């Protein structure tokens, strides 16, 4: 699944480092895979919040002169995903405003299931909006709270918000991290020594800590709110405990393989998923080939378990552009071919097991199967290192609607026919938890199982924005 | 006074024209002299408000493809002035938001004297702010109003606002124009026939109507709110009548000479000011030369009245850039010289009357006098077609602080010494009203007289914004 | 004549100043009126020639960081005019190459009449070309010369070139200025003291000297080649003397009014042309109004001589953009109206003398006459401060072709009918020389008289370039 | 070896396709790995050559509107590599000029060893230069040739050029491909059917043919010149036969793994190099890990041959930026860490064989070894799938100078100490040819062996350019 059908966001914050913005920048760079549309950093020098947000990739945005302007010992940042039609600088985060207690910035990864309802209420009492983002809703809840302390306001605001949120706030003198009580989206805590002082870092994934050489401490726990301030770090758990619902799909596809997620190394989990896939769905074949890059770890596991040789029968072009003009005399599998090339010398006459992490619409898999056949593969056995994706995500991953998900209405055999594979096997639901020794508690697998841990309130409340900022972005 | 020491903004709106945005664009172009920092247009196609705002000049921003996106039969626009340090796209107008009744856009020329107080109140009840602009205050007042109709909300909001405002609002189906009860800033109403239908235009000055061939109808009256909607035009005067305080300085310097302001042609008024100046302050001399461009009409009047020949002894370079690097071996009068060149062949050995519209800090006048002397002028008599500028403007013109105004603390003789002229004369206060047959009612001349019609409430409430958006603007 | 129908180029060079590039920059800024398409500077620090060329206006191109890179004590620059279709960075000057004697840069104002012939010869012996510019031809002539010294090469090259050239060359240690033997295009020499050393400046017009406070010495004489080098300034006149043919049209329209050209102040010459025009073509009227800006000095002269009052009945918008989208319901005189606005209050019921410098196609004049009538003028008498323009220029001014020049095939009465004026009068040929006390020798007035001083060899040799660089310019 | 220490260029041409430029664009995209600095395409519509060249990546440059302007049925393109200091649009290819026979464009991959000598000769006879590129030398040789036909001129020009060249020329009606007699750089020929007509494609690598679905025909042979014109394809071999010297390093590192080079699949060759490396240099270990991406195929081969498990202990961030600001409190291995992250969970306590394709300076390998140790590796055995790189390339690959190559002066044991590995083994020279069954004829392995097939003439003739175009590139 190399097309960008499922994406979310990254958050990153540093407190107590003389080069806080540079650290956040490096963290955002390490988290680039979680969002490529826009990026932003807000820093505090104690007197003013300075922000820089821009469309584009992290490494293109944060040049030396930009970083220099982001002074101060604390900073938070954000990478945003890219979805068509909504790409705009207005949606870039961190979001920054002034309210009665002064300036505040916010970075958000997740999705509120009652954002529409809350927005209706807020507008009814006089709030104005410039976007449809959940983030703007959260800020308004904080600004309109009757509580007198910032923490009181945040607690009141989040007690009204339902759904998924991994949040970072920045004020002139504090950084605050918060994660929803079910813990949908990941959020980790680290520390570093800078000279004599101890500083802290909070990020979506551990790979961001690795790059800046912070020590991983632990996850920000579901329902926890941590304040980093002049007196150090304080933890609060103001909400009633709730069953955990950590996103299993982060393991399958989303997280970077070198991150440690919920206590385990993602690369090793994916290898194990591949091993389990081989155990469940062995087939006589000549070689195993991954759909790069996301299918590589599972393919290694599959190859090891099955004893079949691993080959790279599909080669990826890493210089990917956004759009290509398809020639009029159409090139077969054009959309896939600009990213992948199938190697005849490797595949010709071979029975091939091709391993991918998931199937979304099925159209990409169909093109891949045909490419493999065109390159001479005698048999094509598609193996998927997760169960069929039957439902959308309401908790912060940007997925197609249910009707676009091929597995929502088609049987595995129907999908096999559609993608024209000789065989198609998914990992079983139980198998997916095999690496956890069968323990299945504490995860959200709604996109596979339909068991949605939190009801989506906004059906009927989802409003289309009647504003369109046509300002050209360069 | 050719340096940009006093600037304000322009508003322009069109209702009922198939190419509304193009008309607004042309109007903004005609009003470019009122603001060169940024420009924006918001149009309504009945379903969505589409906006485009950008730093730069009107003719550089609104290319064909931009105008095409701004569909619909109604549109409002705005030119913003340029002041150092605050130049940013965030301040570009029209400002557009969604509130409980849907989307709304606003363009504002003027300045509220109680914006800080109102903002404190609004924040206390939960409003959030992204800028220090008055416009954001007005929008919040509308959004938090308890009135049920938009007109009710606008009336309530404006009844709390004190100071100067010439406003345009745009919703999906209506355009609304409003002018404060004292009428500080100009605002004119015109109409045009587009096919069978009658359309309307509201603009800061009549020169915008001329370019798009709209017929001038009248001023939007002080205290008047006009709604343009499906049923045509409706006028409302919800506020108690107040003495008028129309800005006299628009006549002296700000308005375009080909505009008709408060019922009179600006060019002819300026010529008359020059004539009166000659009557009051004649001097034996060989020629009259204007400081171009703003001093030209008054110089013509002065020359006519005095019988002295008019010459262009100072030539202006119209390709003006923002910044120049002054060479280390300093060039004399560098700041002025990049804009003006004094002509030795015209000036040598001559007794010169040089006519300007006003003196702000005195430094520019000083450089001009020296340039004229360096070019051989035997005598330099400076004549100013307005009284000494002794106080700042709180009603929408961006002036230096009182302490920077040379006339606030120096006598005319002290100023003369400073600028090193052989003589210096200002127009008398009475003389300034000579063209009105001595009628002095209905104008604000606070910057000359110190008679401020509305008290400035915000002393002590003016808050510095603690946000700084460092995103580079190209 | 405010539309850009006739433009040429500017050259500027400084030798012996620690901030040579900054000086050239200021000079180019003062010469912006001679070319607005592109601008460039090449400096020498003695070891390498550093160049910067870009599309756009001088003040937009040469930011501080750009100037800083252009190190060295000598520099030459160039402004290029704008003509449709050929606008491209490839044509931007100065042109810089390496040949057998090292690096050399060249700035050129003028036009060779035998460039096509020379190019054919050069190509036949192996030269390659990237443009159709004369400049590339001159450089090839120098590079392929058999002479051993640079001066020998330049003399040989220029002895083969026929037509108009005001040239500046820059090598690592020398600057060289050259003007063709007939002196078509202006070129002036100045000096300045920089600390203890004496430096030199060469520019198209004296206004460039004024801005940088250089002292005017004299014209670079027709046929003169001046070398500025370690040993100071050396003058050479290697060509046989030729009758002078200095461009009279520089006086009429092209030069900046504050420049001194061929020994006279341009503004005063234009005033005198206006006076003579009044003497020759008086008419009963109520006022005189210029077509701004180029018609202003002649209008002042006309008003003075005729005793009629001068008024600005047409107001110009100085914020001129390149293109405007004309609304579908066409605005009358759209093309002119975006630049000029006619003032009813000044013109209504008046008999108006409108003064312009020349008429090219007649379409602009026609629109102006109609605008004046629409604004209420009872009579419109058009007066032109030069004779009818009957032929194109082959010597460096970019004019329309003969067939586009209305006066090439129409009588004055026919033109009057076309522009719909009540009367139309041109200055007589003799009258044009009146300010010279009737002396008519030494000038090129071919565009008025058809007396072309040098035959245009390239008919039949003019080749269209078969290369088109479509690289987008921003 | 993932840092860009060795790069070259790509050429691509299409003849006889209605969307020739779009095809070339796709081919350049597939060849992006051979050059990321700039890219260009020139197309011919039979009347004019249209060009577009720009700094940046292929997919960012060739937007739809750009491709549309590149009309015609034939086109050639070029990707240029990036080297510091010389990055400039002036060096972007294809190079386009007009000479006596009309317009011609050229794309070049390779390096002439006598370019300096030839340039001296050309300048002596009057040629001018704007760059130091070999391409400009070739064009001048063609333009100054006394031959009357284009083919005669090309043959004469290339007979004087010594060294490496894979060339494409485009004129109004022909495309010409040429490869030097020793065949240093690859160049392949393909065909496609477009409707009824047969078209041709020439490219640096076969992966470009795959993407546009052209059929691979054969290599353009060393010494061959192929003309594609109205009469189809004609082949010429005008030069005396020479021993072949095809670049072996294309197999080791440079070519894309899915290309077929000199008749073999690159990926399979690299796997075989890894197998041979394992046979020659086995070691007791727990796992094999590649330095991604270039070391992956060899690591797979090594793992297969050795029976050790393959793991991805180093994870690469594919969103690579050009520059990063290193924090003041230095991050260990910063330069490598922004690209690679070592996985503790995979590596801890393990004896690790790390496979890379080559070592250039040794600094990167040293950082990698330390990263592996920091992540817990007990032993680190570095294995290189090529012999020690002891000399620079003079034939078109941009390598460091000899003194920068660590293997030029250090023994393997010294290098091992420098990079601090427990063991370090290179592939043997014979082993490198193992996949060819020991046949070692026909390749250039000068960078490993010091056997330079063509003497580098330019020592002493290499001239520094005395021009520097400082125009800022965006």
Image: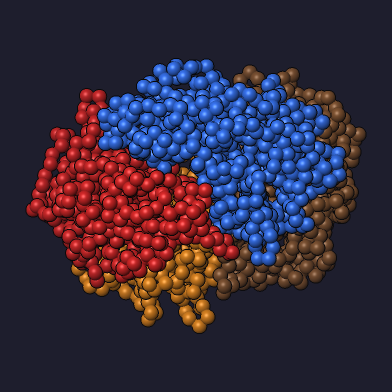
Chain colours: A blue, B brown, C orange, D red
User: Is residue D450 found left or right of B346 in the rendered image?
Assistant: left
> Can the viewer see residue B120 in this picture?
yes
Q: Residue at x 53, y 41 (%)?
A: A266
In the rendered view of the protein, which quadrant contains the N terminus of chain D? Answer: bottom left
Q: Nearer the viewer, residue C411 or C82?
A: C82
Does D13 sit left or right of D55 as displayed?
A: left
Q: Nearer the viewer, residue A426 or D67?
A: A426
Residue A254, horizontal then vertical, whole percent: 54, 37
- Residue A294 can be seen, yes or no: no
Tell me residue B419's x, y (percent). 73, 69
Residue at 23% x, 42% y: name it: D264
Residue extending furthest toward the bottom: C196
The residue under the point 72% across, 20% down is: B230
- Please provide percent x and percent y for residue D325: 54, 59
Q: Residue at x 68, y 48 (%)?
A: B81
- Whether residue B457 sits left or right of residue C98 in the image: it is right
Q: Can you say whether D136 is above or below A137 in the image?
A: below
User: Viewer-proximal residue, D108 or B157?
Assistant: D108
Residue A112 lies, in percent from the top left, at: 69, 32
Q: Is residue D206 or residue D159 the one in the foreground?
A: D206
Q: Extreme left residue here?
A: D240
């Amino acid at each position: 699944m190399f097309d960008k059908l499922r994406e979310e966001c990254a958050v990153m914050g540093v407190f107590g480092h003389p080069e806080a913005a540079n650290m956040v920048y490096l963290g955002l760079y390490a988290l680039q895979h979680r969002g490529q549309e826009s990026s932003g950093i807000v820093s505090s020098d104690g007197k003013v919040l300075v922000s820089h947000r821009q469309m584009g990739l992290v490494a293109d945005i944060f040049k030396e002169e930009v970083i220099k302007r982001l002074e101060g010992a604390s900073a938070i940042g954000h990478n945003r995903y890219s979805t068509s039609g909504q790409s705009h600088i207005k949606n870039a985060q961190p979001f920054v405003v002034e309210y009665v207690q002064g300036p505040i910035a916010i970075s958000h990864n997740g999705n509120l299931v009652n954002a529409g309802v809350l927005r209706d209420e807020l507008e009814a009492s006089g709030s104005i909006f410039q976007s449809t983002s959940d983030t703007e809703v959260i800020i308004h809840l904080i600004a309109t709270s009757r509580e007198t302390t910032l923490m009181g306001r945040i607690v009141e605001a989040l007690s009204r918000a339902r759904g998924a949120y991994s949040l970072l706030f920045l004020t002139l003198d504090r950084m605050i991290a918060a994660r929803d009580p079910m813990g949908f989206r990941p959020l980790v805590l680290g520390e570093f020594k800078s000279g004599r002082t101890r500083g802290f870092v909070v990020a979506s994934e551990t790979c961001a800590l690795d790059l800046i050489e912070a020590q991983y401490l632990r996850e920000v726990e579901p329902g926890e709110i941590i304040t980093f301030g002049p007196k150090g770090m304080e933890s609060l758990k103001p909400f009633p405990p709730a069953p955990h619902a950590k996103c299993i799909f982060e393991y399958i596809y989303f997280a970077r393989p070198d991150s440690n997620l919920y206590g385990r190394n993602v690369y090793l989990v994916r290898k194990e998923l591949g091993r389990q896939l081989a155990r469940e769905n062995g087939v006589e074949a000549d070689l195993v080939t991954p759909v790069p890059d996301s299918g590589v770890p599972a393919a290694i596991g599959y190859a090891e378990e099955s004893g079949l040789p691993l080959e790279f029968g599909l080669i990826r072009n890493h210089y990917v552009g956004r759009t290509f003009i398809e020639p009029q005399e159409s090139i077969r599998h054009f959309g896939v071919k600009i990213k992948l090339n199938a190697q005849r010398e490797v595949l010709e006459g071979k029975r091939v097991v091709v391993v991918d992490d998931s199937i979304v619409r099925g159209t990409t898999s169909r093109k891949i199967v045909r490419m493999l056949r065109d390159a001479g593969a005698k048999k094509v056995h598609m193996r998927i290192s997760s169960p069929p994706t039957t439902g959308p995500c309401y908790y912060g991953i940007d997925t197609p609607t249910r009707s676009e998900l091929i597995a929502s209405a088609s049987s595995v055999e129907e999908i096999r026919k559609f993608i024209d594979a000789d065989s198609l096997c998914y990992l079983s639901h139980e198998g997916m938890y095999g690496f956890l020794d069968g323990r299945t508690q504490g995860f959200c697998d709604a996109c596979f199982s339909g068991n949605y841990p939190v009801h989506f309130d906004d059906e009927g409340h989802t409003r289309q924005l009647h504003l369109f900022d046509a300002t050209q972005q360069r």
